[in-house]
Image (cartoon, helix red, strand yellow):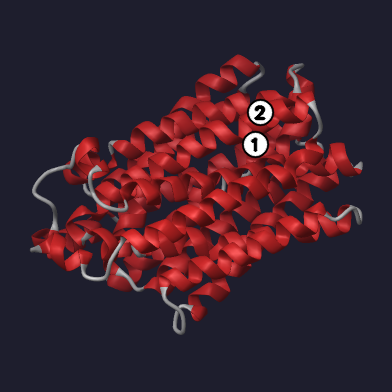
């Protein structure tokens, strides 16, 4: 039964990734149809991110009340409804309204599932499960590119992904007895109450890990959202080809996480993060070279490879850094901080690109990566072995 539940969690992680890259892949076409500037993708991204911030901060309370299984099923159902709303929208302002349930559905399930895996499974499973997210994120823009090339328009791409989410919702509701059994087995380690935000911020290392997550997601989502537009505007690639090429960034993340699962047998979480940071910097340097779209695309793929181990490794280390009975609260604020990065940085880049050029993308990513590295190293100094044991006592 435990293996069946793990398989369902794998499917849930695929579901988390499926819609994440759709907007970036479709936007070069969508903004023309809606008659709005290129930078308006940032506002949609901001609404989605705002919803995820709210639901991530509430994840500790929601998980205590509903349990991980029920919360996951309800959240995926909300996302499915939002995607179908996207598919029938003919107005930019209605798109913003549908982005609200999209964001609310995404945040709490992300935090709850990540904490569940961090507590119950080894580091390799965290990497492989996030590899499943990467599969979903790679399939999403590929489906959108196929829909655009076959004349189904971007609406058809959203409709296909929405149908897949409905199927997963049904599977999750059918699996609820498995989650209840595992929840009962681990009830003794559950926290007595949800921590408040001021209490969390007083924990040593909490601020540093929040800024690290802010920077990581700002880097990943800015690259993913603007990759297609960067290739179209800066390198003259066609919109259809750029939508398909953008999926290569997520293929880099996916392949990297598949390999990372095996590397974790030899390296700990801290080492995995540093390996990822080095690869991300190498990818950004490739993008800075004036050698054409092929080298720029190679840089984006290398950034994806670098992103691969960072997110799952920091999450998996959370119970060790802060204690198992505080990990859901910490992962909740980590997710919220990550989504604040998503909320602010990609749209700010959109404004900068409108005013100057999408060619600023590698410089933007370099600044974010530098701050992320500094904050992670500070976290490594503040966090100490044995914090988990102290928190339990």
Q: Position of residue 164 (x, y in %)?
A: 53, 47
Does 393 sit left or right of 12 as displayed?
Answer: left
Which label sits on residue 138?
Answer: none
Front-lying residue, 7 or 261: 261
N-term-proximal mark, 2 vs 1: 1
Q: Position of residue 213 (x, y in %)?
A: 45, 49
Does 335 sit left or right of 200 as displayed?
Answer: right
Residue named by callout 1: 23
Q: Position of residue 248 (x, y in %)?
A: 72, 57
What element does badge 1 sit on?
helix
Q: Are marks 2 and 1 in contact (CB under 8 Å)?
A: yes
Q: Is residue 162 above or below residue 348?
A: below
- For the point 35% across and 51% down, the residue is 172
Which label sits on residue 41?
Answer: 2
Q: Quadrant of the N terminus?
A: bottom left
Residue 101: image quadrant is top left
């Amino acid at each position: 039964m435990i293996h069946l539940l793990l398989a369902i969690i794998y499917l849930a992680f695929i579901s988390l990734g499926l819609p994440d890259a759709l907007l970036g892949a479709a936007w070069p076409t969508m903004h023309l149809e809606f008659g709005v500037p290129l930078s308006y993708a940032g506002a949609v991204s901001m609404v989605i991110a705002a919803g995820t911030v709210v639901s991530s901060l509430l994840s500790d309370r929601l998980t205590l009340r509903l349990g991980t299984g029920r919360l996951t099923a309800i959240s995926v159902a909300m996302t499915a409804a939002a995607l179908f709303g996207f598919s029938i929208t003919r107005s930019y302002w209605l798109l913003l309204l549908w982005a609200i349930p999209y964001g609310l559905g995404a945040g709490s399930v992300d935090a709850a599932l990540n904490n569940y895996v961090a507590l119950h499974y080894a580091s390799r499973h965290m990497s492989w499960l996030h590899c499943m997210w990467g599969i979903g994120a790679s399939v999403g823009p590929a489906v959108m590119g196929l829909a655009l090339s076959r004349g189904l328009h971007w609406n058809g791409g959203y409709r296909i992904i929405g149908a897949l989410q409905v199927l997963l919702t049904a599977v999750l509701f059918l699996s609820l007895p498995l989650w209840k059994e595992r929840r009962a087995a681990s009830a003794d380690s559950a926290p007595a109450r949800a921590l408040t935000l001021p209490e969390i911020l007083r924990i040593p290392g909490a601020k540093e890990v929040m800024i690290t997550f802010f920077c990581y997601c700002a880097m990943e989502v800015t690259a993913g959202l603007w990759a297609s537009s960067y290739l179209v505007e800066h390198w003259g690639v066609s919109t259809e080809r750029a939508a398909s090429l953008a999926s290569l960034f997520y293929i880099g993340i996916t392949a990297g996480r598949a390999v990372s699962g095996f590397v974790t047998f030899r390296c700990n979480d801290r080492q995995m993060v540093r390996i990822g940071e080095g690869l991300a910097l190498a990818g950004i340097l490739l993008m800075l070279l004036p050698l054409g779209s092929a080298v720029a695309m190679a840089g984006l793929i290398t950034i994806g490879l670098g992103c691969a181990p960072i997110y799952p490794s920091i999450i998996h280390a959370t119970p060790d850094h802060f204690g198992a009975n505080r990990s859901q609260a910490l992962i909740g604020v980590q997710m919220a901080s990550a989504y604040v990065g998503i909320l602010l940085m990609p749209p700010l880049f959109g404004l900068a690109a409108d005013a100057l050029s999408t060619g600023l993308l590698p410089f933007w990513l370099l600044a974010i990566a530098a701050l992320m590295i500094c904050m992670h190293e500070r976290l490594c100094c503040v966090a100490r072995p044995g914090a988990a044991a102290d928190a339990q006592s």
